[in-house]
Amino acid sequence: MYGKLIIKAFIILSAAWLAYGAVNCTAAGRFADPADSTCKNYTLCVLVTSNNSYIGYNYVCPTTSLFNPITAQCTTAYSCNGTSTNTTSTNTTSSSVCTTDGFVADPTSTDCSSYIQCVLINGAFLETTLTCPTGTFYNPNTTLCEVNYVCAFTCTAAGRFANSADTTCQTYYLCVLTTTGTYIQYQYNCPTISVFSPVTRMCTTSYTCPTASG
């Protein structure tokens, strides 16, 4: 019996060619690059609610996987131009996060700014960590990065963490590890004119809140 195989590629990929997506975005979602004959490139289209327009961000499927325009996912079970790269195995595989091809929330992210792309290759899941474009958050229900998604914060480590749903940057969460191995979560407000800096994880007057200054 095959052992548990987990291949993790912790590649923090930021979006490339910000306003120059390969796809002319008319809806939110992931779409195949029509000019790519290899079927590896796709564009993530994000809705900009301030002007009801879309911005495209280009990505490339990892290793031997291809982008399936029907499922909008990278997979090895898709046939591109009549050529299949199906190398999946019927063996039982296990992963700390992935259970099928697709996208899932990053359990280590406290602000919903990153997510994990799952691709089954040769009986093992390749887990690639991706970051959402600036100002957007990963919605596990739609598997897309969205501007209006409110991240439900859950403590996964001890310390102070920014409240991504607070556009004033004045509130933060304090996570305390108990003797039982669980976390207790508290929410605090920074005093008067100070704001919470996610860099120093302290209330300060020297940090500029991105949303407050916009």
Image (cartoon, rainbow, N blue to C red):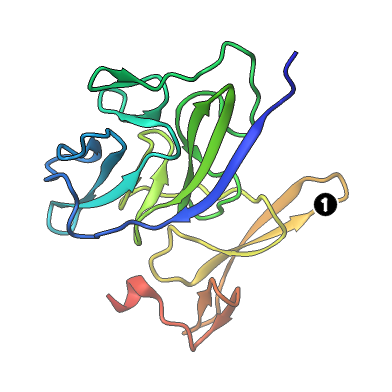
Residue found at the far bottom of this picture: 206
User: Residue 51's x, y, as percent?
Assistant: 12, 58
Q: Which residue bears the numbered disc 1?
A: 178
Q: Is residue 124 left or right of residue 83?
A: right
Residue sitting at x 50%, y 83% = 194
Q: Is residue 96 visible?
A: no
Q: Amino acid at mark 1?
A: Thr
User: Residue 86's x, y, as percent?
Assistant: 43, 19
Image quarter (top left, top right, bottom left or bottom right) of the C terminus: bottom left
Q: Secondary structure at mark 1?
A: loop
Residue sitting at x 53%, y 75% = 196
The image quadrant that residue 3 belongs to is top right
User: Residue 56's x, y, as percent?
Assistant: 21, 51
Up-down: is 104 above or below 134?
above
Q: Is residue 66 left or right of residue 99?
A: left
Residue sitting at x 56%, y 65% = 172
Q: Is residue 87 left or right of residue 179?
A: left
Residue sitting at x 40%, y 76% = 209
Up-down: is 110 above or below 207?
above
Label 1, residues with CA under 10 Å away: few <14, some 14-19, many ≥20: few
Image quarter (top left, top right, bottom left or bottom right) of the N terminus: top right
User: Residue 79's x, y, as percent?
Assistant: 31, 19
Residue found at the far front of this picture: 83
Up-down: is 140 above or below 194?
above
- Depth order, front residue of 169/16: 16
Q: Is residue 91 visible?
A: yes
The image quadrant that residue 94 belongs to is top right
- Depth order, front residue of 5/176: 5
Q: Is residue 114 left or right of residue 25?
A: right
Q: How many marks?
A: 1
- Depth order, front residue of 3/166: 3
- Depth order, front residue of 51/71: 71
